[in-house]
Image: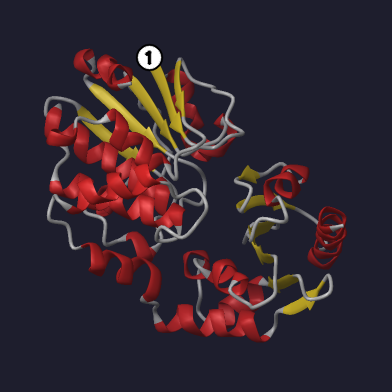
Amino acid sequence: MADILDCLAGASSVIIAGHTRPDGDCVGSCMGMYHYIRSNYPDIEVNVRLEEVPESYAVIPGTENVITEYADDKSYDVFISLDASDKARLAGAIKYFDTAGHTICIDHHISNEGFADENYIVPDASSTSEVLCDIFDHSRISYDAAMALYVGIICDSGVFKYSCTGSHTMETAGMLMDKGIPYTELVDSVFYEKSFVMNRIMGYCLLNSRLSCEGKMISCYLDDDTMKSYGAVHSDLEGIVSQMKLTRGTEISLFISDSGSGGLRISMRSSGKVDVRKIAGIYGGGGHTLASGASASGDPLEIIAQIEAMVKEQLS
């Protein structure tokens, strides 16, 4: 499917964007595409527009160049959407999608029905970063692009332990490792190193979590006032729901936090017996069977109770 990028040959400006609240695969795939275009199409002006990039992903080269505001009305020849399951997930970047001369959607979410002029969606892939590796000419992937794509793959595969990991995922990761990237340091930086604030807020959430559904579900709600008391921002919440899921005997972890704008952010992880994508869909969200999220409004305790009921129904 390398021909999906044929339109770049005649373009002078390209925008790359991903989903709201960018995670590792979103940032990794966007920056991987950014570096690939810069290396192989040097005459093209390329911008990456995302919401604030979490500190954990600052190890990816070039993230300091990400544009996090959408105030201008710039028009682009090509819009490349990466890791966004539907147009609405592009958040503030939608305005550039609507005015672009040509649009491309590359993704791995099974719920993505294709919303661009050209769509390349591979639900069996571990990550959008893996999909990009199949599109790119491997000999033309730079060191910086390899760094970004490797981070994207390890994030969405849980360092190759999630069920979405296949032999092709491992082969692709090996190809990127052969570029000389510091793969051990990348895993440590993205997955294990935490700031003091991140450790403290995670500790609070673990101490205040609760079990339900006969010990099969662990949940926690974090309000905005508590976040502020710890000096935390939303990017400091990265990894909390996954850490909760490591609790022995649980099938699903649920983490709800105030969005800061009057709403709620819902994050869920599952071991497989509960399809959290179905639950997220009730609240207008989406994702994968084992990892999904949504935005909502209302009483967080009521939402936890609603999700508990849906979990019980699926487990029965």
247 sits left or right of 78 in the view: right
4 versus 179 height, above or below: above
**Residue displayed at 63% across by 52% down:** 293
Classed neighbour count for the residue bearing mark 1: other residues with Cα under 10 Å, few (<14), some (14–19), many (≥20): some
Q: Position of residue 106 (x, y in %)?
A: 42, 30
- Is residue 259 visible from the viewing direction of this image? yes
Residue closest to the eye, 86 or 4: 4
Expressed as whole percent of the image width and height from the top left, the position of residue 154 reads 37, 56
The number of numbered badges drawn on the structure is 1
Q: Position of residue 210 (x, y in %)?
A: 75, 79
Which residue is under mark 1? 101
Residue at coordinates 20% horizontally, 16% vertically from top-left? 9
Residue 149 visible in the displayed image: no
Place residue 208 in its image quadrant: bottom right
Under mark 1, the amino acid is Gly
Q: Residue at x 70, y 65 (%)?
A: 251
- Element on which disc 1 rests: loop
Q: Quadrant of the N terminus?
A: top left
Which residue shows up at 33% across the image and 31% down it? 15
Quadrant location, the C terminus: bottom right
Horizontally, is 248 left or right of 185 in the view?
A: right
